[in-house]
Image (cartoon, helix red, strand yellow):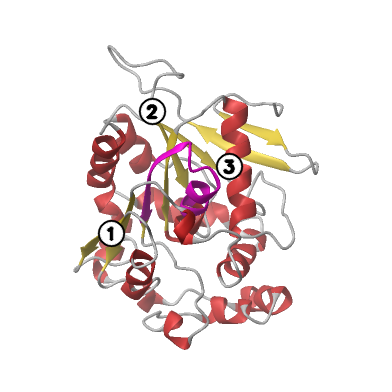
Amino acid sequence: MAELTGGRVGSIIRPDGRSVRFFDTGAPEGPGAADDTDAPVVVWHHGTPQTGAVIQPVADAAAARGLRVVSVARPGYPGSAARAGRTVADAAADVLAVLDALGVDGFTTLGASGGGPHALACAALAPSRVRAVVSLAGIAPFWGDVDWFAGMADPGGLRAALAGRDARAAHAETAEFEPESFTDRDYETLKGPWAALGADAGAGAAEGHAGEVDDDLAFVTPWGVELGAVSAPTLLVQGGRDRVVPATHAGWMLERLRRGELWLRPREGHVSVLTALPVALDWVVATSTR
C-alpha cells in the first residue's frame, strides 16, 4: 500500500517516485451518518485547469445524499508531479492507486469537462469496482476528423496539441480566454452557485501550464482505453449550447458505450450544465442501489 500523508488533503508516492495529491471529504456529518468505510464513494475528476480540490457545490450536493467524495489532482497540477507523455489511462491509474491507499473498493466515477475522459477511463480500467459513471460536458476521444472541433469557440489549444508538446506549450504562453466560449447562462452560473469553480480554475493554473498542456495532449492522442470497455451504467450530461465541448461529442460517445444514457439540456452551456449535478447524483444513488 502506498504511504498516506496529510489527512483529508494528502498524497501518495507512486512507484516511479512521483507524488500524487488527493482530497477526501470523508463521511457526511450529522445524525446517523455512516463512517468513512460505509459511506458510498464518488470519485470526482476535475476539469481543465483545476486544482483537484472538492469545491463547495460538489461537496454540498454529495453530502446531501450521504456520499463521500475523493478527488485526485492529475499530474502537472498543484501537488501532483508532472508525468511526461501521460495518457488519460495513466492519470486514471493514479486515481485507482489513491483509492487503493484509502482502502476504497467499489465507487462511482464522475467527471466534468476534462475530467470526463478520466471518469470513463477509471471505469474501463476497473470494471469490477465501478458501480456507475457520470460525464458532464465531457470531451470525446479524438476521432481524427475536423468535425471533432466543430462548434468549439476556441479550439486553438487542442489544435496546437496535435502538433506535439512544444507547440501546445508555446500556445499556452500567449493564449487568452475567448469570452465567446461561455454563454450568458455560464456567466450567471459562475457568479452564483458555481463561483468556486472560477476561483479554483485560477488556482489550478497558478503554478504554470503543465497540467493543462498535458491534459490537451492526452485528449488528442489515444486514451489507452476504449469506450467499449466501460461496462457500468454511464450517464452523459450535455449542454445543447456548449461552446467548449459541443454536443456532438456526447452523441459520438453514446453510440460507443455499452450502457450509455444521454441527458441533453438544450439551454445549457459548458458551465451551466453543472447545475444538473444534484439530479445526476440522484441518478447515481438510484443506479448504484438497483
Mark 1 Cα shell of 10 Å, populated few (<14), some (14-19), many (≥20): many
Identify which residue is drawn at 52% across, 53% down: 121
Location of residue 193 with respect to 263 vertically, above or below:
above
Segment colored magenta: 119-135
Q: CA distance from mark 2 to mark 1?
A: 24 Å
Q: Nearer the viewer, residue 86 or 160?
A: 86
Q: What is the quadrant of the N terminus in the image?
A: top right
User: What residue does disc 2 label?
Assistant: 40
Identify which residue is drawn at 58% across, 42% down: 95
Residue 91 % position (x, y): 61, 51
SS under mark 3:
helix
- 128 drawn magenta: yes
Q: CA distance from mark 3 to mark 1?
A: 25 Å
Residue 195 appears left or right of 76? left
Identify which residue is drawn at 36% across, 41% down: 58
User: What residue does disc 1 label?
Assistant: 273
Could you tell me if residue 74 is visible in this image?
no
Callouts 3 and 1 close, C-beta under 8 Å: no
The amino acid type, in three-letter code, at marker 2 is Pro
User: What residue does disc 3 label?
Assistant: 95
Residue 258 % position (x, y): 37, 57
- In this view, the mark in front (3 or 1): 3
- In this view, the mark in front (2 or 1): 2
Q: Nearer the viewer, residue 36 or 287?
A: 287
SS under mark 2:
loop
Residue 82 appears left or right of 118? right
The amino acid type, in three-letter code, at marker 1 is Val
Q: Residue furthest bottom?
A: 146
Q: Quadrant of residue 13?
A: top right
